[in-house]
Image (spheres, grey):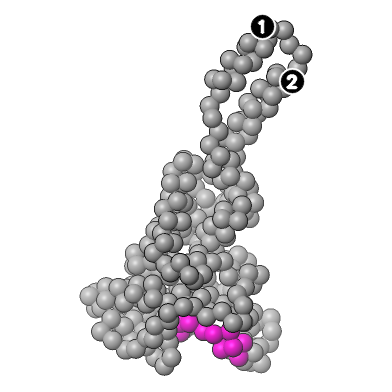
Amino acid sequence: MIKKTLIITTSLLILTFTACAKSKAAAPANKETSAVSTTAAAAQPKVNPEIEKLNRVLFSMSDRCKAVIPNGDPEEFLSDLHKVLDSASEFSADDLSPFYLINKTHTVSSTYEPKGLIHLENNSAYKVNKNNLSLRPEAYRALAELGTAAKADGVTLTISSTYRSYEYQKNLFDYWVSVDGLEEAERESARPGTSQHQLGLALDFAPVDDAFDQTPGGKWVYQHAADYGWSLSFPQGYEDVTGYRWECWHFRYIGVTACQFQKKWFGDVQQFMIEFLNAWQSS
């Protein structure tokens, strides 16, 4: 919560000075008082409206999100933020934002399908263990770069799941409900319309189990994924934030710039960063 205190305290000081100036201007005053008030008002620094907006948005975030934001310069934060927002231009302009907030309360329609999905096949960069896997073009290219880099280090990555339609997700969720019951299913499987997989930007590495992070592929991915724009979606210890238990195999493509921003300012928690971006853009 240190970062919140730093920024919001700055804003409150500015607001206090502004209020004092308004109070003096409104009070009955002789010419000397008016002259002093005018001079004082003219000497006041201009408030950066983006810092005021930053204060409002940060104040609206959850306490747990505020707690991970480190102490730092608001101007530096804003500079990094705009780099992230500008990086969205690297994605198709006629599709959903790469930072689209989708979770248990933010959905996409049953008819949404990403544009330009590209089919994945076994290749020199990585392997697939299912047919009919596909990704948005931006994620497809980034996966090829990730897989090629892994291969250069002697690691072969295997992809198990990518884009899923609304109907596919519905059948999958219903299956897990029948196996584990509703409460447990909701910890591990998304209801239709709430899955990152429907965005065409998320994938599951194989094996899809808790041992993935201990495999050579998992260890390599954890060390290098962000260098290629891939972010872990459901980290350990954040089920109350993401709505899902730890999924060490599930990554979402958000781009290198956003991964750097996420790590620097949001404790490397994707959910916090995307919630912030959503709040910023809707503010």
Q: Quadrant of residue 29?
A: top right
What is the quadrant of residue 188 in the picture? bottom right
Q: Secondary structure at mark 1?
A: helix
The residue at the point 46 percent across, 51 percent down is 81
Q: Residue at x 41, y 59 (%)?
A: 87
Q: Specify whether residue 128 is in view.
A: yes
Q: Which mark is residue 26?
A: 2
Asked whether, in this view, residue 270 is left or right of residue 26, the answer is: left
- Say which label, 1 or 2, has the lower sequence index: 2
> Magenta segment: does it hold 168?
yes
**Residue 59 location (% of width, % of height):** 63, 48
Dividing the picture into quarters, in which one does residue 53 lie? top right
Assess disc 2: are there few (<14), some (14-19) or many (≥20) residues with their C-alpha within 10 Å of its C-alpha. few
Circles 1, 2 touching at the beta carbon (< 8 Å) = no
Q: Residue at x 51, y 70 (%)?
A: 96
Which mark, by number, is residue 93?
none
Q: Which residues are magenta?
A: 161-171
Q: Residue at x 54, y 42 (%)?
A: 50
- Between 22 and 191, the one nearer to me in the picture: 22
Q: Give how far across and how far down residue 57 sits, in percent.
A: 60, 49
- Report which residue position mark 1 lands on: 32
143, above or below 27, in the image: below
Percent of width and height locating residue 39: 58, 15
Which secondary structure lies at badge 2?
helix
Q: CA distance from mark 1 to mark 2?
A: 15 Å
Residue 232 magenta-drawn? no
Camera-nearest residue between 194 and 266 = 194
Q: Three-letter amino acid code at disc 1? A: Glu
* Image spot of residue 209 (x, y percent): 48, 83
Q: Amino acid at mark 2?
A: Ala
Determine whether, in the image, residue 204 is placed left or right of residue 100: left
Please say if 81 is above or below 212. above
